[in-house]
Amino acid sequence: MNYSAKRYWEPSTPYLLTATTVVGAVSTALWQPLDMVKTRIQQRSEGIGIRQLGHYGGYNPNKVFREIHAQGKGMTGLYAGLDSAILARSVHLLARNLVYKVIYDRVKPKKPSNDLTPREKALLGAFAGAVGAIASNPFEVVMIRQQCDGAFQPDIRRNYSSVFDGYSRIMGSELGVLGLFRGVGPSILKAIALNSSMSGPYNWVNEAMFNCFGETYVNRPMAMVFGALVGTFAALPFDNVKTRLQLQSSDASRNRIQYNGFVDCAKKTFMMESWTGFYSGFYVFYVRAYFYGLTTIFLMDIITNRSKRKAGLKPKYI
């Protein structure tokens, strides 16, 4: 039998890194307003117990959206920190996927099955996600501060002109080099939780729907409903703690609550807000995770399918 080598196609490391980084940047830009609203909700919900407010306290997504929009900048106000968000996401994806791809390509040929088990892939994904979180943390610190700056009084705003201005000011005069790694602990745990909890349920539901209904256009959107929900429950508590630590000022008088690290922040959040404090911004985080995940999947499909056709792969193998 005559098999053509063009039937098989696998992305090279530079191709994979470039495609995933570009797709991640596009997805981040598209859904930045949702991330902005989520961060503002987390900022406003801090310390609601000592302020004697109910957990919702008027901080529902629609109200926060309208308040940001009404501050005078319209929709552009919802894109505060977009440069740092794109840079943070790009660095995270570049570091994570490089680590994953390098280790995967080294280990896979040594396996009798020529592939890793789902558990091994999950562990590798968690490790790679942790590396990505460390690499991108400095830019996430700037992003959180840019997104929350408009909620402060004008005289105490940081007014970073760009991600690089914020980076240099934090490192030079505000907090020093260590300030760029504030919240790195919960940032790592968030990346691990999101990587290990979202893809598994998504793949399980997607495969189950394929077995029941065949290849349809609703398989992935329906699978993402479940995957994003599990990922939100697993990752949002760490995201809330991360936001509070990264937003904290070196001047204690400007902080609503003073935190001394990850454990202290988690303890005070629970004491003042109960367990619900860890899930501030749940609805927006979930919607953003859902649409970000779908956008990434469909854009990667468009890019890789085009490359497969150019490589001569027949449609039935794409």
Image (cartoon, helix red, strand yellow):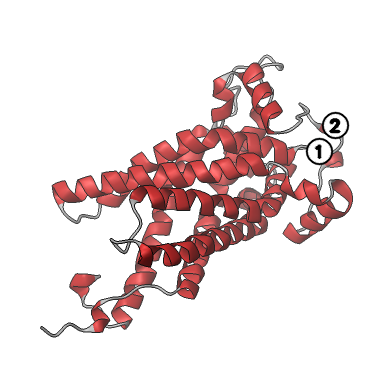
Asked if the residue under mark 2 is in contact with the one under mark 1, i.e. CB atoms within 8 Å, the reply is: yes
Q: Hey, which residue is sitting farthest right in the picture?
A: 173
Marks 1 and 2, how far apart at CA: 6 Å
Q: Nearer the viewer, residue 116 or 312?
A: 116
- The residue drawn where x is 10% and y is 83% is 1
Q: Amino acid at mark 1?
A: Ser
Counting from the top left corner in percent of width and height, residue 177 is at 81, 52
* Relative side of 132 to 309, left or right: right
Q: Amino acid at mark 2?
A: Ala
* Relative side of 134 to 256, left or right: left
- The residue drawn where x is 24% and y is 55% is 217
Tell me, yes or no, if residue 204 can be seen here: yes
Counting from the top left corner in percent of width and height, residue 255 is at 80, 31
Name the quarter where the C terminus is drawn: bottom left
Counting from the top left corner in percent of width and height, residue 266 is at 64, 27
Counting from the top left corner in percent of width and height, residue 91 is at 61, 61
- Count of numbered tags: 2
Q: Nearer the viewer, residue 51 or 268?
A: 268
Q: Which residue is mark 1?
A: 249
Tell me, yes or no, if residue 288 can be seen here: no
Q: Does 1 sit above or below residue 209?
A: below
* Relative side of 137 to 168, left or right: left
Q: Which residue is mark 2?
A: 252
